[in-house]
Image: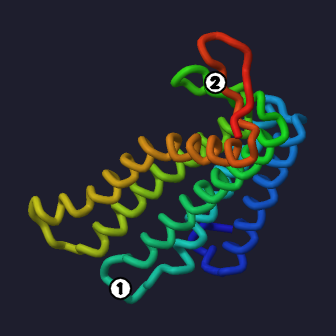
Amino acid sequence: MAIETWDSPYIVIWLCLGVLATVLTLGVRGYSDKLNGLEAAFYSVVIGGLAILNGAALGQTMYDKTAKYNVLGRLGSALGLSSPLIISGLILVIFYRFRVVKYPKEFMIVGNDIEISGSYLLSGAITLLWFGLMLEGIGMMGYVQALIGGKTGFFYASLALIPVVIAIWLITQYRKWMFKYIVWVLRRKGLLQVVDDGSKSKDID
């Protein structure tokens, strides 16, 4: 079936459910420490592939054949592609939060640095959020261009770059916010592991 015929909301729903089922499987297996690198890569590829199809399907569903500039279609493609990746990344952050609560020694502060044990959950969350935010910025740039239409000039060209600039700024910040959230959770539960000057770890209330 050609992508151009994917104009049914039911296809979008099924693709979103496929992404949700895949990311939940990845999260549960990562939380239970039953995940290896090859399996994590496979789940990530499946999520990415379903997100690409979802972007195409939602774009076709929202496509306005009567409009000169395909504003709604561009918006649908941007949201359909990036939203599953961003939401999947956030879901994996929640699973990682539960994992470090269960195994707090996997996340500790040594001096002014954070030391983290290798985790496919965390790397998956970081990767999916990175791609999701970047694709969101690029997709929204296309949406702004369609919204502007045939208008030209430096001002209108700069407007199209705003979503990409915002996406890049979010990419530079989201890991810091993520780690601050994990530190806050562990500190609130009295599980934060801190090492001072090479001494043994201690719990912080």
Q: Nearer the viewer, mark 1 or mark 2?
A: 2
136 or 109, nearer to the observer: 109
Q: Amino acid at mark 1?
A: Ala
Image position, residue 43 (x, y; %): 76, 44
Query: Element type at marker 2?
Result: strand
Image position, residue 168 (x, y; %): 38, 46
Identity of the residue drawn at 53% across and 52% down: 132
3D distance between C-alphas at marks 1 and 2: 53 Å
Q: Amino acid at mark 2?
A: Glu
- Determine whether 39 is above or below 189 in the image: above
Is residue 198 shown left or right of residue 46? left
Is residue 181 shown left or right of residue 204? left
Q: Which residue is mark 1?
A: 67
Q: Residue furthest bottom?
A: 66
- Quadrant of the image for the C terminus? top right
Q: Which residue is mark 2?
A: 115
Is residue 149 shown left or right of residue 56? left
Image position, residue 202 (x, y; %): 73, 25
